[in-house]
Image: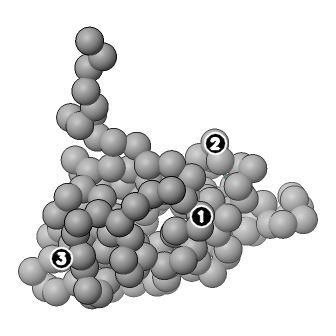
């Protein structure tokens, strides 16, 4: 299980001084994910999550993008959070109303000083729903 890092963000609040950092964070939502019934109907549950995330990010300096598939279909509604030069995160088991959680995660990421999304303060959906975190290439050691 992923452990808390030494970084401790007290809140997910982002001051005006952190707005530049928040600009380096991108939330990517899979707009193709189906609801729990697997229905093909539109709008897809993933589209609803993308809309909900855009709404939650309104007025925030965070990029919200959507894609057709994150290759995480078995974990239902899926999204990723990326930050330049930091670890990349993939989440599943989200709901159509998880947008605020994704934006909270993006804000926490923006305040991180170690390249990880802090565990403390992270919404439960981004704890239980963690699928993988992928390091930036600069952190990957060569095999000898
Ligand atoms: S359709 Fe959403 S992850 Fe594949």
SS under mark 3: helix
Residue 75 is left or right of residue 114, and the answer is right
Q: Left or right: where does residue 74 sit relative to residue 92?
A: right
The residue under label 1 is 129
Residue 88: percent from the left, percent from the top? 38, 50
| Residue 5 in the image, given as x and y percentages of width and height | 29, 63
Query: Which comes sooner in the sequence, label 3 or label 2?
Result: 3
Looking at the image, which is closer to me, 111 or 58? 111
Q: CA distance from mark 3 to mark 2?
A: 31 Å
Residue 29 drawn above or below residue 59:
above
Q: Secondary structure at mark 1?
A: loop
Give the secondary structure at mark 2.
loop
Residues packed near mark 3 inside 10 Å, few (<14), some (14 to 19) or many (20 plus): some
How many numbered marks does the figure carry?
3
Tell me the residue at 45%/57% (across/down): 2
Check disc 3 and report the residue beneath it.
Answer: 19
Identified at 22% across, 69% down, the residue is 7
Is the residue indicated by label 1 positioned so its CB lies within 8 Å of ligand 1? no
Instruction: Say the numbered circle drawn on residue 83.
Output: none
Q: Is residue 4 left or right of residue 72?
A: left
Question: Would the CB of label 2 be found within 8 Å of ligand 1?
Answer: yes
Q: CA distance from mark 1 to mark 3?
A: 26 Å
Q: Is residue 96 above or below residue 84?
A: below
Sequence-wise first label, 2 or 1: 2
* Tag of residue 71: 2
Q: Is residue 36 visible in this depiction of the protein?
A: yes
Left or right: 99, with 94 as reference point: left
- What percent of the width, then of the height, locates residue 36? 84, 66
Residue drawn 73% across the image and 68% down it: 45
> Could you tell me how far apart the alpha carbons at marks 2 and 1 are, in whole angstroms?
15 Å
């Amino acid at each position: 299980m992923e452990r808390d890092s030494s970084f401790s963000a007290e809140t997910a609040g982002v001051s005006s001084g952190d707005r530049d950092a928040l600009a380096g964070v991108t939330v990517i939502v899979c707009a193709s994910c189906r609801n729990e019934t697997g229905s093909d109907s539109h709008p897809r549950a993933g589209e609803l999550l993308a809309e909900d995330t855009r709404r939650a990010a309104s007025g925030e300096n965070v990029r919200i993008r959507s894609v057709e598939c994150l290759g995480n279909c078995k974990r239902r509604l899926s999204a990723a959070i990326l930050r330049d030069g930091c670890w990349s995160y993939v989440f599943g088991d989200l709901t159509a109303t998880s947008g605020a959680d994704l934006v909270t995660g993006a804000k926490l990421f923006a305040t991180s000083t170690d390249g990880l999304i802090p565990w403390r303060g992270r919404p439960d959906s981004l704890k239980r729903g963690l699928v993988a975190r992928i390091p930036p290439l600069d952190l990957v050691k060569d095999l000898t």
